[in-house]
Image (cartoon, helix red, strand yellow):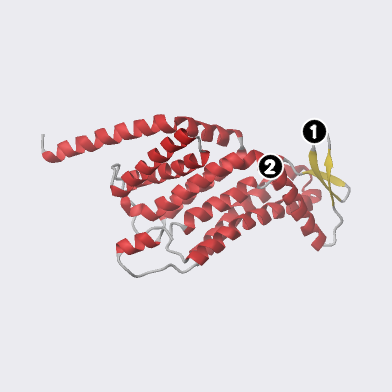
Amino acid sequence: MSGKSKQSAWDITVSVVAWAGAFLLFWKSLRWLAGTALAREQIAHAAVVLIFGLIFLLRERREAPPVVLRFGRRAAEFFAGACLGAALAGLFHQPLLMLCALGFLAGAVLLFVCGDQVFRPALGFGLAFSGFTFLSVLFPFADWPLRLLAGKTATWFFGLLGRPVELGLAADPPRLILITGGRPFEVATECNGFGIISGCILLALLLVFSRRLRVVDKLIVLALAPMFGLFSNAARIFFIVLLAPAAGDNYLLMHESVGILLFFGTLAGLWWLVAGLPERHGGSAEDQIKSDIS
């Protein structure tokens, strides 16, 4: 057997053993994440935004990244960070460390598949995946506050048109009802905007840390992202209520069409905003990689 074949066989053995160990170490967390996404439509929407955002980000590069399937230096560093974070999270019972570990794991997967040349996208993907995990944990606590915020913002939109609207609670079980023109509309869990708000946050994390942007530009985008999602969801409620009398029997079609149009339109607008920001240039390749972290 040649030296090259021995090296290839060694790389395969190391990779199989390493990922098998990572699977056992992260199995419970990944199973919980998958179950949460399947049980909550809004979380599933955020996951889809993250995955497709990464795909489009990689496709917009001048050259498509190759499939490497080996541990380069940075892939090994991310993988070690993931394992260390998971071990410390279990040892000290600190969930925050597991959030960080899952981010390192996501970055390690991308670096393992495509090589160290995708360091910047891997950094953005890792941070966004940690954000996705945090938002999945946050969802049960955010439902009612987001519904109230969405209802009040939609009411503000109607106020701009001088159209009377009432927002109140109907008890047992508690429901948030928006009444306009004598017609009630329930602001249900599906209307809380968690999907589009979290999608905007995750896409912003993915994009700003995948590009060499100024720190102030990164902070502005990250601050604007949840506001994009909030106003998009309120606009969705506003237009659905506004168009409901004319929709008649096609209410469900109108409801879904408005939701899909605003969902993808908001994400496209956020992508356009980030794409228009100037990137930093100059310096050595190593200096540029170091600057990506800032």
**Who comes first in sequence, dot 1 or dot 2?**
2
Residue 182 visible to an observer of this rendering: yes
Mark 2 residue crowding within 10 angstroms, few (<14) / some (14–19) / many (20+): some
Residue 147 locus on image (x, y percent): 72, 46
166 left or right, relative to 143: right
Residue 240 visible to an observer of this rendering: no
Q: Residue at x 53, y 32 (%)?
A: 32
Q: Which residue is mark 1?
A: 173
Reply above or below: 121 against 220: above
Q: Residue at x 87, y 56 (%)?
A: 164
193 left or right, relative to 156: left
SS of the residue under disc 1: loop
Mark 2: which amino acid?
Asp
Residue 182 locus on image (x, y percent): 89, 48
Q: Which residue is mark 2?
A: 143
Which residue is outermost to the right?
182
- Dividing the picture into quarters, in which one does residue 41 lie? top right
As rendered, which of 52 and 14 lies closer to the eye? 14
